Image: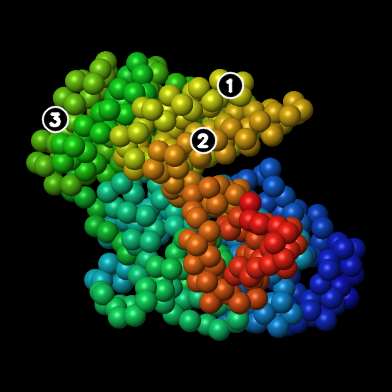
Amino acid sequence: MATATLEAAKSSGSSLSGAVLAEIVEAVGKDGLIVEANQLQTYECDGLAALRTLPCAVVLPRSAAEVQAVVKICAKHKIPFVARGAGTGLSGGAMPDAHGIVIGFARMNRILDVDLENQRITVQPGVINAHVTQKVSAAGYFYAPDPSSQSVCTIGGNVAENAGGAHCLKYGFTTTHVLGLDVVLPTGEAMHFGASTVDAPGYDLAGVFVGSEGTLGVVTAVTLRIVKKPETVQVLLAAYDTIAQAGQTVSDIIAAAILPAAMEIMDRLSIEAAEASVHPNYPECEALLLIELDGPAAEVDLQMKQVRELCRANGAWEDRLAQSANERFLVWKGRKAAFAAAGRLAPDYIVQDGVIPRTKLPIILEQIAEISAEAGLRVTNVFHAGDGNLHPIVLYNASIPGQEELAVDLSTRILHLCVDHGGSITGEHGVGREKQQALGYMYSEPDLDTMQLVRCAFDPENISNPDKLFPRPRLCGEKTGHYTPHPLEVAGIAEYF
């Protein structure tokens, strides 16, 4: 290994030995290893900036073979590793381990194959989500999952988190569109999951891998399903005096057997922030419902007429149809900018991610308003209403003593509300480090232990994104991984809490 690299590793305080770093350089080259402390800071957190840890090193492989070589080194020395795409995740899933390595996929960003006849495309994990659609758009196709961060987030991260987006109401989440995966398991073995035919025999290992948050291994290539562009797209903006009216409209549209491509709700605060940020020309109102219909022109015309009638029946005082592709673009640009625009409302904020049955929308929103008032913090709401996927944004100022703790507590109480009403603690952001304890609120101990059996089957040494997803610790001094009784528990001195 180059002397300069070793000296930089020493000055950074890296706990990796010179011998290990030399093996890594052998695998990815000198320019594929980062150990300087100031450069490692770029990787100390993902979109959940409240939690930060410096990794020992970052490696930037160029190929699946280099990824496999790095993971084999980690397996040999039992070094934890965390895969990272663009770092846009919002639950701390890509947060490094203080004793481990980050495997960054910035240099694995090539589109490997386009197969229009079979409506599929194969990409490396570092390919940006929006670039998939750009690649096939001229041929009349698109890639449906569209997270708000789709202009920067990567397919590998989308697979890890089973990412969603506005159009997943009709087209499904990432898992619906993953046909095959090339992966490197934590043992260093290279595998392919999925099949080129429907209803493949055996376990659905690709399905297990999608949404596993990097705890089962590392993706090195993904084959995705692409879909034909619809003949017609129409987007309606409906303005209301209350969120309850907008929420009831969502339920009525679904009850009328109409399946929009997307249905999103924004409250007044998020509307104002988006308007100031990207000027989408939204109406000034307490709640804005965005509805997109797509499909054959005659069908869309007929259904949009029904949708407008339902909007007016629920109190919409303006229902405006976007008149051009540019207007539709602006409507969605404003919605997708809502998270970032929250920075105009407060110095700090937590974007939460919970799911509820659609019919619970009015009661949940009322209860969120009540507990935010109790906490003395503002919460703005923008969400995938059609899916029941809430994104309450808790606004706070970390420079005020105690306010960050209040914000964290409030966001946890919101997740508990979702579970109490038959929902989930995450719709598309994953559990990561942020919501580990909330997972324990949602699942019983046998459920969690069964999940651990799956995890340990792939990762017996617990080195692939360790200490994420599962609630820890349950007992002081308990090791991570599949549960084994603690000696104090066996002796009857301690028990689970």
Q: Could you tell me the amino acid type at mark 1?
A: Glu
Mark in front: 2 vs 3: 2
Q: Could you tell me the amino acid type at mark 2?
A: Ile
Q: For residue 271, say whether it is visible.
A: no
Mark 2 closeness class: few <14, some 14–19, many ≥20 residues within 10 Å? many
Residue at (44%, 46%) from the top-left corner? 424
Task: Return the mark for residue 305.
Answer: 3
In which quadrant is the N terminus drawn?
bottom right
Which mark sits nearer the N-terminus, 1 or 2? 1
Relative placement, left or right, of 383 versus 186 is left
Quadrant of residue 107 within the rendered picture? bottom right
State if disc 2 and disc 1 touch (CB < 8 Å). no
Identify residue for label 1. 374
Q: Position of residue 475 (x, y in %)?
A: 69, 58
Identify residue for label 2. 414
Residue at (50%, 55%) from the top-left corner? 444
Q: Position of residue 270 (x, y in %)?
A: 48, 27
C-alpha span from label 1 to label 2: 13 Å
Residue 341 drawn above or below residue 182: above
Mark in front: 3 vs 1: 1
Viewer-side residue, 305 vs 421: 421
Which mark sits nearer the N-terminus, 2 or 3? 3
Residue at (18%, 37%) from the top-left corner? 255
State if disc 1 and disc 3 touch (CB < 8 Å). no
